[in-house]
Image (cartoon, rainbow, N blue to C red):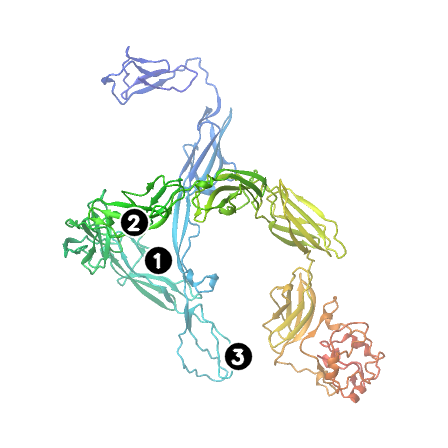
Amino acid sequence: MVLKCNPPPSSMQPIIHWMNWMLLHIQLSERVMLGKDGNLYFAYTKLEDTREDYTCNIQYLATPNSVVRNRRPQLMRPSGTETTYHVLRGQTLELECIVQGLPTPSVTWLRKDGQLSESRTTRDQFDRRLRFTNISEVDAGEYQCMANNTQGKAKHIYMVTVEAGPYWIKEPVSQLYAPGETEVVFSDTAVYQCRAANKHGTILVNTNVYVIELPPQILSKAGIVYMLTEDQKALLDCETFGSPKPKVTWESDSGPSVLGDPRFNPLTSGNRTVILSPPQALRVQPGKTATFTCLALVDPKLAPPLIQWRYNGQKLFQSYAEDKYTFEGPDMMVANVQEEDEGVYTCQVITKLDLAEANGSITLVDRPDPPALLELSDSKHRAITLSWTPGEDHNSPAEVEFEDQGSKPKVWEELQRVEGSVLSAGLSLHPYMSYRFRVLAVNEVGKSDPSKPSELHSTPAEDPDKNPEGVRSDSTEPGTLVITWEEMHKWSFNGPEFRYRVFWMRVLGSGPKWHTSDTAAPPFLVKDVGAYSAFNIKVQAVNGKGEGPEPKPVIGSSGEDPPMAVGIDKVNSTAIRVTWAAIDKDTVRGKLLGYKIHLTRLGARDHRRGGAARDPQEAAVETLEETGPVEEKRLIGGLRPYSHYSLNATVFNSKGEGPACEPLAFDTVEGVPGPPVSLILESPGETEMTLHWTAPAHANGVLVGYLLQYQQIVETADSPMQVITIESPVATHLTVSKLDRHSRYRFYLKGRTASGDGDPIVREGVTTLDGGPPSNFSLAVGETAVNFSWTTKERHRNVRFQIHYFNKKDGQWMQSERVNSSQSSYQLRGLSPGSHYSLHFKHKNITFWRTDVDTDGTGVMEVQGGFATQGWFIGLRSKGGKYSVKDKEDGPMDSEARPMKDDTFGEYSDNEEKRTASQPSLCEDSKLCSEDNLDYRGGGSGLTTELNLDESLASQYSRPSEGAEQLAETSALNPPPAAVAGAGGATNNGMPNSVAILD
């Protein structure tokens, strides 16, 4: 035996003493020796060596000429240059750095991948330890201990990895929804469980989703009379309730809606508080936890409610010390339920305006006591009555079990269930069985302990009352008839010495003579009966008391010889040649009709050549080839390349097929792939086309890439074919550049294997042109809305724009939502009736078209002096309705000051001419529209206006004037300054010298 000392290394020789705790030397002898290494050696041990205070003491004596030399720091603990720690979130971690050196080294700590947190760490043992308390993920990283003295430095690296079991950052809470909110439907109401797990643990939380659908209710009383004086405000109450929140409309006898009148304003009121999921009546086992849920619908404009729980009317408060009552949102948990916790629990939902409450309860339940005093009576042929006395918790349903004394091992099995109010049961029994019965009470908690067993009851033996089912032949060996059936349950034996009696008789040749034999179990074999011979077969149940009913016969047959020497030759990737040796016709019972070749595709071969399989897993597909009786080979085509197959063959006659030969497995060779499943064209630019495709459904081998061919589609002849080779078999898209923006292209995409290129998928397409804002606007004006429509340019990209509009009454600019040019139409709503609006259409904050509109209806008008109030005012009629305003979109010129085009004043269609044929035009037989008097300056205006003027009156204004040039600056919505301001301008005979054309 050896006690080791292990003195630390030193330049001086140590003096070693072995002592006890009283510092008395251990007695050395020939049996107990001190080695030079400091260990204590025992040649053998005695009882007197027994002690627990062996101590190795080491002494170093410095000689007078000893020189103490300075030493650079060295790490004593930990060893090496780097240490790795794996800790869990929340644990405490200590990093230790113990060093030696002279002078005594100082130790500093730093974090190499960031700032060392002083608030999350502490140091002790003279900075030799760095402690993390309640460590978290932010503490993970690389740390360094640096020891330093005048002789040098030493360092050690600590790699800290922090992991964590799952914990909640945001715990899901129960929510209440109405149908249609956040896409929930009524069937989504359920309890959902969120489970988070990793290798460190699992956390679970249940959350309730309630989708509540309640019909609207008006809670305000009807027939309330409001008495007010003129000019007072009337506040009419209409308190409603429902889920989803009802939409309230107001009506009066004068019309369908009163909200169109600007004097009426709807004020949104709230809903009363309603408890939708009240606490339930809970039946709880002692020691378990009961959970009540109280979910309420509170008006969203109110602050979150206070939920107050009461027990038998007394307020409950969360008990942190005992953990008896715990409140979590709408839930309250009662822990360790005991008898004193039974009672009524009330949930009160309190807001600053109202209160709602609902009650639940706790009732203690436990497993029922077992029934007792079992008694058998009224014994009959196959029945008996069992009665019992119930235990505690009456009215619990009962379960009757029996034990068959003849079975090994003996097992209790359920026989019958009865309602809780029933205290006896009539039991149906089987013949030739020994029964013992017992009864158990059952409730929602579980089953009681079983009652004591009843006395033994045996039933007498009888003849079998049925025969086995599923009688058939399963013959596979030539010349052997195999008869089998489904075994009967022992409860149907009905008596001792049970066995099966098997009958068989050849259908033809031997006459009506049944052969019989008894057996204990299926199957039963009859040998040397010839190949594929037909037999009548039947099986009867027999016991020591007698025989079962007369069984019905079925047809079976013996086994048949299979074809011999089946072979396979591969022709190509989709065809094989099958050969076989003909069967001896003398072994065929009946006329030989031919051979059947069963071919089964088991699936694709591994489509990986350093990559993943591309074909999906497929179910086995079987095909059948029939041949004539003299054929000995057959060419079979239509096989799938690069697939696993199995083949077998059978002989068949008029009665059916014989047994199959041993299956042969073979693989087809690689072929060319099928076409890609899909090909979608997408144009990212005017000269680019991106192709997105899906790999071929049938790769028929290992896909090595794709071949893309494309060409321009021209009317005269096809243009040259461009070719791109795609080397990657996993590629799914490609962008083709430098295309002609004016041309249409046809694309051909093929998959490739080592066998060649497959069939292509073909698509045609054209690039998409860069879009601009829409044009050709048409509009229709109503009281509170304007409908715009425009023409979408073919092939142009979608452009988003906004409509900025300005009501000249209130002087406030508004803007619409973003409109997509692909919509082709848009309705600008929310306008004021009888108002004048300026509309600016903007794309990328640049106005590309603008116009002015007047909404229909009566507005508050300010009467101003001007030409409209003068006695010379000329009434005008416009075409109205929907009109084109195209020429207001082209160019930056102010749409309110555009000149008219030459030769367009007074234009109208044939229909207009017919409609106004009886009304003279302003330009007919008048000099007013002559080129001498109207200088159009080559402008353009699509506004066509008819003027109903008296011809003589019009002639008064047909004189040439030097101010006629001002007409070019006047439009339908921009009268001359003099007319607008009501001030005098250049006139002829006191009248304006230009005509304002008004729409």
Q: Nearer the viewer, residue 363 or 347?
A: 363
Give the residue number, with chain letter if any, for mark 2: 468
Query: How far apart are the alpha carbons under marks 2 and 3?
Result: 92 Å
Q: Amino acid at mark 2?
A: Pro
Residue 582, image x, y percentages: 50, 39
Q: Does residue 896 show up?
A: yes
Q: Amino acid at mark 1?
A: Asp
Image vertical order of residue 608 relative to residue 179, above or below: above
Q: Does residue 118 show up?
A: no
Q: Amino acid at mark 3?
A: Arg
Give the residue number, with chain letter if any, for mark 3: 263
Q: Nearer the viewer, residue 881 or 815?
A: 881
Residue 448, image x, y percentages: 22, 52
Q: Is residue 967 left or right of residue 214?
A: right
Judged from the image, the secondary structure of the residue bearing numbered disc 2 is loop
Viewer-side label of 1, 2 = 2
Image vertical order of residue 999 relative to residue 191, above or below: below
Query: How far apart are the alpha carbons under marks 1 and 2?
Result: 60 Å
